[in-house]
Image (tube, helix red, strand yellow):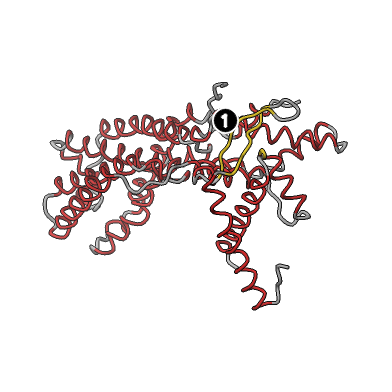
């Protein structure tokens, strides 16, 4: 006789539904289905398959049970009165500065403040988020925010070094030709390991699949790729900057340096969290 | 028919089926699924995956109440019984479905009788 409770626990690792009563009840249902199949003359293997037909998608079941048990509540007060108005004000100020093209550093501070506040709002509403948001987007956003803040902090620390301006994505020729400070890049790369680990850990904690954990971990690299593949060429076109088109190897090197090694570092950080945690027996 | 409408009809019919069964006696999950299948000639079938999210939703709304008891074989099972709130839902739900079938009948000759 299979250990139905163990089977249910293994297939529904999401903490949100891994309660003793739910596991026991679902296990009892599978056991009854199994018994019915054996009573019909099925052998053990076929009876097991018959019982498991009851659940075509365990992840979907876990999510449906989580939703069914989740108490519906309106947006909480903290989100309504603090986070959302705060984000709106900060976003508006950031937008205004962007339009006026003033105070580059202040713009960045405002932008990252906005991201951090968004994260706080999401955390505040965590129980209302769906599985994909909790296991992919939120961990990915945490990792992206951390990576971006780290980059920004490095920029501030290394601001006295003229070569640091390589990081300016407007790709002006004098900036690109200046080269990249090694300490800046190595520091950035090492930090990715930590951010990848954090994202994968958060995704696993939210019941994310292996794919979701990897996706959450490499999220900063995906955004960086989008930046290089779309924003930078578009910006160069808008500014009639021909450097990009005349120096394609530089551009391709930039894409490689800012996307591939960071992606590898992020995945390396995520590796310990790609293993499933054995659930504790109740 | 869009997937959303179909899903709402399936869900609505499931709620009515469960409330109607539990109005007669307390049952545990497997028995509920089995009896619905048997009594509808297999037209309405519940698997574990479709039954429990609905049961938990109904429990959250206070329509049904689950309690652990030993069944005839001495195994612990969670028996569901109808609450007073659930009983109040039954009549309007039945009426809703009657109206639905009447409407379908007048439109497409689909009789519920």
Residue B111 image-quadrant placement: bottom right
Residue A11 image-quadrant placement: top right
Spot the residue most to the bottom. Answer: B107
Question: Residue at the location (32% across, 40% down)?
Answer: A124
Q: x%, y% of residue A82?
A: 22, 45
Compared to residue A159, the image places residue B105 above or below, namely below
Can the viewer see residue A194? yes
Q: Quadrant of the C terminus of chain A?
A: top right
**Mark 1 secondary-structure assignment:** helix
Residue A193 image-quadrant placement: top left
Q: x%, y% of residue A148?
A: 28, 41
Residues A140 and A256: in front is A140
Q: x%, y% of residue B95?
A: 59, 63
Question: Residue at the location (55% across, 48% down)?
Answer: B86
Compared to residue A193, the image places residue A282 above or below, namely above
Q: x%, y% of residue A258?
A: 35, 42
Left-right relation of B103 to A222: right
Left-right relation of A173 to A66: left
Question: Residue at the location (35% across, 46% down)?
Answer: A224
Check disc 1 and report the residue beneath it: A21
Q: How many marks?
A: 1
């Amino acid at each position: 006789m299979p250990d139905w409770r163990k089977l249910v626990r293994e297939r529904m690792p999401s903490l949100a539904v891994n309660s003793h009563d739910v596991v026991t009840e679902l296990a009892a249902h599978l056991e009854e289905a199994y018994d019915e199949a054996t009573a019909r003359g099925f052998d053990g293997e076929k009876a097991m398959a018959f019982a498991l037909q009851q659940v075509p998608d365990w992840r979907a079941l876990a999510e449906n049970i989580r939703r069914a048990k989740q108490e519906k509540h309106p947006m909480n007060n903290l989100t309504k009165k603090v986070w959302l108005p705060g984000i709106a004000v900060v976003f508006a100020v950031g937008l205004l500065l962007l339009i006026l093209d003033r105070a580059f550093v202040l713009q960045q501070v405002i932008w990252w403040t906005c991201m951090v506040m968004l994260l706080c709002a999401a955390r505040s509403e965590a129980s209302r988020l769906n599985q994909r948001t909790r296991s992919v987007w939120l961990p990915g956003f945490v990792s992206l925010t951390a990576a971006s803040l780290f980059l920004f902090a490095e920029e501030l620390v290394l601001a006295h070094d003229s070569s640091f301006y390589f990081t300016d994505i407007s790709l002006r020729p004098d900036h690109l030709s200046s080269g990249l400070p090694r300490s800046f890049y190595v520091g950035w790369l090492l930090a990715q390991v930590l951010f990848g680990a954090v994202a994968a850990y958060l995704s696993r904690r939210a019941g994310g699949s292996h794919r979701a954990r990897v996706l959450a971990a490499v999220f900063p690299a995906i955004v960086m790729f989008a930046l290089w593949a779309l924003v930078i060429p578009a910006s160069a076109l808008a500014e009639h900057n021909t450097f990009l088109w005349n120096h394609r190897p530089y551009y391709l090197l930039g894409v490689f340096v800012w996307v591939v090694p960071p992606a590898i570092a992020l995945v390396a950080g995520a590796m310990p969290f790609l293993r499933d945690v054995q659930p504790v027996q109740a | 028919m869009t997937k959303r409408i179909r899903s709402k009809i399936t869900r609505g019919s499931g709620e009515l089926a469960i409330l109607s069964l539990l109005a007669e006696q307390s049952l545990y999950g497997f028995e509920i699924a089995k009896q619905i299948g048997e009594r509808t000639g297999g037209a309405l079938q519940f698997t574990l995956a479709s039954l429990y999210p609905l049961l938990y939703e109904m429990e959250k709304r206070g329509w049904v109440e689950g309690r652990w008891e030993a069944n005839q074989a001495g195994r612990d099972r969670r028996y569901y019984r109808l609450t007073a709130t659930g009983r109040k839902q039954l009549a309007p739900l039945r009426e809703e479905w009657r109206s639905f079938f009447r409407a379908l009948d007048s439109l497409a000759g689909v009789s519920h009788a």
